[in-house]
Amino acid sequence: MRSLVLACGVVLAGALAFTVVAVSAPEQRQEQQAAPFTETLQTRLKRLPGDYRGWARLGMEYVDQTRITGDPSFYAKAEGALATAARLAPEDDTVLTGQAVLAAGRHEFADAARLANRALHVNPYSATAHGVLADAKTQLGDLSGAEKAVNRMLSLRPGVPAFARASYAAELRGDRDAARRLLLDAEADAFLPADRAFARHYLGELALHSGDLRAAGDWYGQALRAYPAYTPALAGQAKVAALGGRLTEALTLYDQVVQRLPLPQYLIEQGETRIKAGLTADWTLLRAQRELLREAGVRDDLTWAEFEADHGDPVLAVRHARAEYARNPNLVAADVLAWALFQDGQPRAALRYAKEATATGWHHPLLTYHRARIERALGLPARVDPGFDPSLPALARSS
């Protein structure tokens, strides 16, 4: 889930927030500085229209604006800037990396990996390109390839983006202690307030997934003290409140979250919390966001497979899940396909994918719960964690 957050720019807060990274990693810059920097680039490019690396950086800034604002229309602007850069210098490594970042933001991970590899052929020492490649490989299910790229990034430029990716790689192979140590390294290395908030937020996510709500809440609070505008940490506090039974507090926090950043993940979390509180969930804005993302060229079958499996049409969930798994056969896609098949009354077909999703030893509560439910339905021995709340699956999913 964090690889999307690290790799894709925006919407990954949707299906997994697995997923941002781009060439200028989100944790590398305070959010309010992004727009002025974009304007400075635009001014420079009017004066120097042949500055292909400037055009590439502008494209990546637009991808980052999508993450900051939740507005996918910035992808079209990014595409235009990067097309200009590519016309001027199609084989420049910065230009290719920018194109890879945009592809990842749109969930076109095979294209992102191809473009990142082309960038690395030109410049094998680009830590940024190695980072984008690691993210894409993770989403394509090539965990060994992703870890190799992460290790190369660490050797070239140890810092918050590299430590965060290394932490995620450790988490996926089931080593929570190493994942935590690496995030602590990221926090220690952080200089900007947004960097510290980023690292502390993911320390909170690790604590949440281990069932320690108090520690998770503490880390989210520390993230917000470092950088009050860091919306993921506010969403983390909302999750802790909801999972702790403080539903009125959680809904107040979610109102603030979706006003700041109406991403699908947060809208689904808010809706589930409303249902838990005995209220009606209104999915109107969620569906509007889906259309905006589709029009911006984002392929996000994963989010909609999850949503349909838990709150809609299981047949449609299976269709979305199969499409996602065919493109990006990663652990989360396998889990979502397993759960969609189970909800559609196909537990035997689901078991294969549930086993695949948990094969690396990743200690993720939602994946564990899904596999246990599927095995129980087949009469196999399985233990469902009594502390897991199946009425709030989106809150468990995000990370």
Image: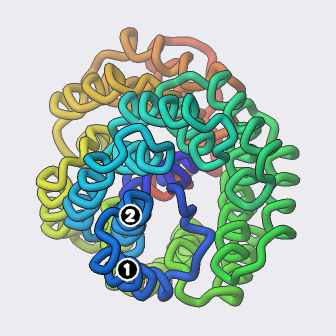
Taking the image as shown, residue 317 lies to the left or right of residue 118, namely: left
Residue 115 horizontal/vertical position (percent): 42, 34
Picture quarter with the C terminus: bottom right
Residue at numbered disc 1:
44
* Real-space CA distance between mark 2 and mark 1, rounded to the nearest whole angstrom: 9 Å
- Pick whichever of labels 2 and 1 is earlier in the sequence: 1
Of 344 and 93, the residue lying toward us: 93
For mark 1, give the secondary structure. helix
Q: Label for residue 319?
A: none
Mark 1: few, some, or many residues within 10 Å (few <14, many ≥20)? Answer: some
Check contact, mark 2 vs mark 1: CB within 8 A: yes
Of 61 and 164, the residue lying toward us: 61
For mark 2, give the secondary structure. loop
Q: From the viewer's perspective, is residue 73 above or below residue 41? A: above
Mark 2: few, some, or many residues within 10 Å (few <14, many ≥20)? Answer: some
Residue at numbered disc 2:
51
Instruction: Name the residue at 70% across, 81% down.
Output: 192
